[in-house]
Image (spheres, grey):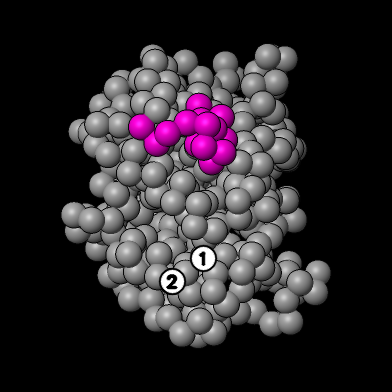
Amino acid sequence: MRKGVMWLMLMVAGTGLFAAPVTLTMLVSGGDVKNPEYVTALALLQKDYPGTKLELSQMNLATGSTMTMDAWLAAGTPPNIYYDNMVRASKYMVPEYALDLTKYIRDLNKYQKSVLAGVTRNGKMLGMPIPAHTQGMCINLDLMKEIGFEVKWDWTTDDFLKMCELVKAKYGTKKYGTMLFGANQSGDYLLHNWFEAFGAHYYMTSNYDTSTIAKTGGAKAYAWYQKLITNGYVDKNAAVLNDDDYALEWSKGNLAAAPFFVSWVGTYQSSALSQKLIDKPFPVMFVPFPRGSGVKKVPGYSMTGSFVVWKSPNEQVNKVAARFVEYFNGAKNQEYLATLGVPPNRTDVAQPNDPLIQQAQKIGNENGIYDCGLIDPRFTERRSLQYPILQKLFTFKMTPEEAIAAYDAALSAVK
């Protein structure tokens, strides 16, 4: 009997049943514990670790910065799990802070190898990549029909200018070919793809110490911005507009062609309908960015994010936090997210049949994904450098050459 009891105790201890219940703190950029993916992950976790609780906190994204996370760290209260877009999450994917998930996540063999490589540093997996979106140029098909313009999959910047002129001729300043904004850094990834449209690259051969954005032709993209403003193809007040203004104008159907993500379409159109900004959803399609002279293909931007688990001195907490991440990013939740337009990054989950998702995936598959240094821990600091320069560029206080030289130097100065 004594041996039997001891065996049972060992077995129960191995499942975590004798360990004190853990309350996980989680800082997120969006979501709610009532959302299906949270409910699913927590239910699975509580089977392994009964009594586990989850405290969810939303970060302040008014400026698109890491101010909430930094405040938590300054107070000495790091969240057990940080869940955010990679534009901010990469800052914390360093061995001094992040738990190496390699020995904790049990189904790493179910992930696409390329996505795991993006969060691995010197053999340590310092994050868990969430399913990624490929950004494309979202075409308002109703607007295109009204101006009599058909967008081709393989189009050029000259084509884009013709389209903008037709929008201007028909709508004046009520609708625009596209939109620029520079009030702050939030949503800046909606603009960066224009560099690649003109063959300019942030970095070469994954060397994130020195920027190449100037020497590869970044001034061409900045000259393009000024041309769009000068010709009245975008709102002349671009310097003081932000990404919320951008989303609103897109939702109202006022942008003919705009960098966007598939998973945003339904959300923003539903919001516009509820606010009576539109009478019905307008049809869209996704194509690559137009090609500048001499450019054969324009790679897309990958809208990815990551979980980062804090390396707690309490190993039991580490186990529970990592297990939650495993379940949250598991097959069940990725199957659910696929129904919302988010393509999975696991090999055991089927890709969705939604034509818009397939168009976005095709952009990435055929044109590739460009490297803006997103996975480098210094990305977050560098991200805040461009918008003050854009404000001067958009108001013609700097030439394209002056602006790109200043941006290039600022990027490379971050060590």
Residue 118: x %, y % from top left: 34, 38
Which residue is pictured at 73% across the width and 51% down the height?
A: 32
Taking depth in this image into account, of 168 and 220 the one nearest to the observer is: 168
| Mark 1: secondary structure | loop
- State whether residue 251 is above or below residue 398: below
Q: Are circles 1 and 2 on residues that touch, CB within 8 Å? A: yes
**The magenta stretch spans which residues?**
385-401
Q: Residue at x 46, y 46 (%)?
A: 226
Name the residue carrying label 2: 163
Residue 246 % position (x, y): 62, 55
- What amino acid does circle 1 point to? Gly
- Residue beneath disc 1: 177
Q: Amino acid at mark 2?
A: Met
Q: Does residue 16 appear in the picture of this structure?
A: no
Comparing 210 with 142, the one in front is 142
Give the percent coordinates (x, y) of residue 87. 50, 37
Quadrant where the image shows the C terminus = top left
Question: For this rendering, which residue is in front, 263 or 353?
Answer: 263
Residue at point 39% right, 66% down? Answer: 160
